[in-house]
Structures are given as structure tokens and as C-alpha cells.
Image (cartoon, grey):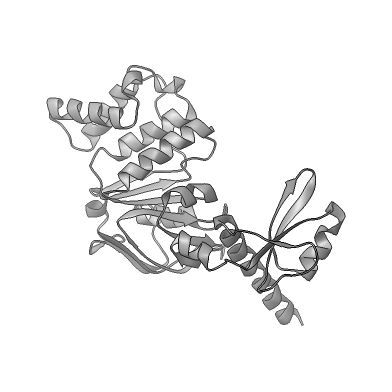
């Protein structure tokens, strides 16, 4: 199976460019689409899910045109958007059965077997009689996956699925996605780096509508070995270090900023070599893009 996205662009009437010539090829397994809020991830997911038209470009799944053959794509698609509604007073079992009817599964016996199997797969079978209004956030997300699997899809899209989940629910949900990725294409759109690091063998980083990186998370991390340096500094020193060094990452540790600097050699006294991880890759790509645009703006202004 293969999803091919070629030069997709979206420009809104007010001139905002949500996507800028995005091209990706995605094969079987878990694919991470990583980027900050507002990067264009949800716009891209809606186009793949046949819910939005691009301004230009094309997309196909196994040779079927996503833009012009929407009905054919929807037969193969499972989609869990960032926000989805449920009827709070109906049970998980009844609503899933109702949604199955809407998907064309009209045989009662077949439908019951399918609903039961999906509730078992998503660890909701013991809660099947419970009203959805009493479900936790993680339980609702697992129900969302159950409804997305009703038509045995070959392409599954999940948009920010673990945002707001507690650690236990997040682990349950990620384990479920990992199982699904064994036989299908699962696109995980998120701003949470840990989700991609733990699940995905292939990924892309998207920001301000552009693809900044496409490839293996492991390869991206390896490329930064020996080039990431860390140091704990005083708060009042932070701006000076940002001016003098390529600071790609910062966090508070013991009340003081811990900074990561990208450099081909030791940037100075007090810095120690750090073992890079996917967060370093992510922030380097994002900060480099911002820095490059600031340079272009300054040149244009002068």
C-alpha cells in the first residue's frame, strides 16, 4: 500500500498559506506527522480524509485519486479527528452498532460480531453498556478508534490522539495504534515528540505549511551525534547565549535553564556533549526555519 502526496498547496481567501507544495510518500506502518500547533497538520489530514479540497497538487492512495474519487477512498479510510462528538446518553455498544449500519453493515448477526470484536480490541467490552457521557477522555479516544475501524480500513488517520490523556490512557492508546500499524498505513498527526519516537519508523516534520524533514526518526537522531552540547546557565544569561550560539532547546531544571546547543565542535567552557534525541531534531528543524526567515526578512528590509 502507498499514499502519494504531490505538491499539495492550500491558500485561503485571506491569503494565508496553510500548505506549501507538500510532497510525501507513505507506505505500510506507523507514520508520524510532527509539528507545532498551526503547522498545517490538520489541513493535510482533512485533505487525505476527503474533507477539504487543496488549492493545487494531487494525492492518491494505491492509485485511487483522493481529490476526485472521494467515495472510493472513504471505503478504505478510518479517521479519528482531533475533536469528535458522541451522543452522551447512548451506550458504546448501541452507538457503535448504529454507526455500523450507516457504514452499510445491515446483517444483524454480522454487525454484532463486528461490534463485539472492536470493543474487545479497544478494551471497552466490559464498558459496552455504559453511556458515553461517562467515559474518560482516553475511553472516548478508544471508542473513536473503534468507529474508525468499522469498515476494516487500509488507511487510518489519527489527529492529535493523545493530547490531554493521562499517562496510563496514553500508553493504552499508543499500544492500540501500534497493533493497527502492523497491517495498514496509520498516520499519527501530533505535536508530541514522544508519541512519534515511541511508535513510528518513518516521519515528517511540518511547520508553517512546509515539510522540513522526511525520513526515519532513528536516522535523524544519528545525524546529530557529536553535534549537541548542553549546559546549565543562569536565567539572566539565556538571551546572551541565544545570540552567541545556536540554541535549539531549553528547559528549566532545578530552577535554572538547561540549554542544548547545536555545533560541530564544543561551543565553549562548561558545555558537555549530550546524547541527542528526537526532541533535539525537532527543535533544530523548527528553530532553523525561524532563523532563516528572520534573515530573509532583514535582507528584504535593508
Residue found at x 82% / y 61%: 239
Q: Is residue 83 left or right of residue 144?
A: right
Evaluate whether residue 113 shows in this view: yes
Which quadrant of the rendered structure holds the N terminus?
Answer: bottom left
Residue 100 is drawn in which quadrant?
A: top left
Q: Residue furthest top?
A: 129
Q: Position of residue 190 (x, y in %)?
A: 49, 49
Q: Position of residue 191 (x, y in %)?
A: 54, 50
Pick the residue in front: 78 or 301.
78
Q: Is residue 113 left or right of residue 84?
A: left
Pick the residue in front: 71 or 107.
107
Residue found at x 58% / y 55%: 279
Residue found at x 69% / y 63%: 229
Q: Position of residue 31 (x, y in %)?
A: 39, 55
Residue 124 is drawn in which quadrant?
A: top left
Evaluate whether residue 18 shows in this view: no
Which quadrant of the rendered structure holds the C terminus?
Answer: bottom right
Residue 92 is drawn in which quadrant?
A: top left
Q: How many marks?
A: 0
Q: Position of residue 213 (x, y in %)?
A: 49, 66
Q: Is residue 42 left or right of residue 236?
A: left
Amino acid at each position: 500500500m502507498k499514499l502519494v502526496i504531490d505538491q499539495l498547496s492550500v491558500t485561503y481567501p485571506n491569503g494565508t498559506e496553510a500548505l506549501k507544495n507538500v510532497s510525501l510518500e507513505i507506505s505500510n506502518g506507523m507514520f508520524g506527522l510532527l509539528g507545532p500547533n498551526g503547522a498545517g497538520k490538520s489541513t493535510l489530514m482533512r485533505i487525505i480524509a476527503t474533507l477539504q479540497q487543496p488549492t493545487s497538487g494531487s494525492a492518491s492512495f494505491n492509485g485511487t485519486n483522493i481529490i476526485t474519487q472521494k467515495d472510493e477512498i472513504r471505503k478504505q479510510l478510518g479517521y479519528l479527528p482531533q475533536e469528535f462528538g458522541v451522543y452522551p446518553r447512548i451506550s458504546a455498544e448501541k452507538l457503535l452498532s448504529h454507526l455500523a449500519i450507516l457504514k452499510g453493515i445491515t446483517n444483524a448477526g454480522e454487525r454484532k460480531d463486528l461490534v463485539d470484536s472492536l470493543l474487545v480490541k479497544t478494551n471497552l467490552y466490559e464498558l459496552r453498556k455504559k453511556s458515553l457521557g461517562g467515559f474518560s477522555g482516553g475511553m472516548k479516544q478508544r471508542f473513536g478508534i473503534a468507529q474508525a475501524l468499522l469498515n476494516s480500513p487500509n488507511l487510518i488517520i489519527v489527529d492529535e490522539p493523545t493530547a490531554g490523556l493521562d499517562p496510563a490512557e496514553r500508553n493504552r492508546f499508543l499500544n492500540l495504534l501500534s497493533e493497527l500499524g502492523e497491517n495498514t498505513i496509520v498516520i499519527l498527526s501530533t505535536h508530541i515528540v514522544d508519541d512519534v519516537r515511541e511508535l513510528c519508523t518513518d516521519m515528517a516534520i511540518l511547520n508553517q505549511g512546509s515539510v522540513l524533514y522526511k525520513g526515519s526518526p532513528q536516522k535523524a537522531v544519528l545525524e546529530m551525534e557529536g553535534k549537541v552540547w548542553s549546559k546549565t546557565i543562569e536565567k539572566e544569561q539565556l538571551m546572551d547565549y541565544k545570540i552567541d550560539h545556536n540554541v535549539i532547546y531549553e528547559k528549566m531544571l532545578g530552577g535554572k535553564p538547561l540549554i542544548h546547543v547545536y555545533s560541530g565542535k564544543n561551543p565553549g567552557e562548561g558545555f558537555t556533549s549530550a546524547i541527542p534525541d528526537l526532541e533535539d531534531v525537532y527543535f533544530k528543524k523548527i528553530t532553523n526555519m525561524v532563523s532563516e526567515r528572520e534573515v530573509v526578512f532583514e535582507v528584504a528590509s535593508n
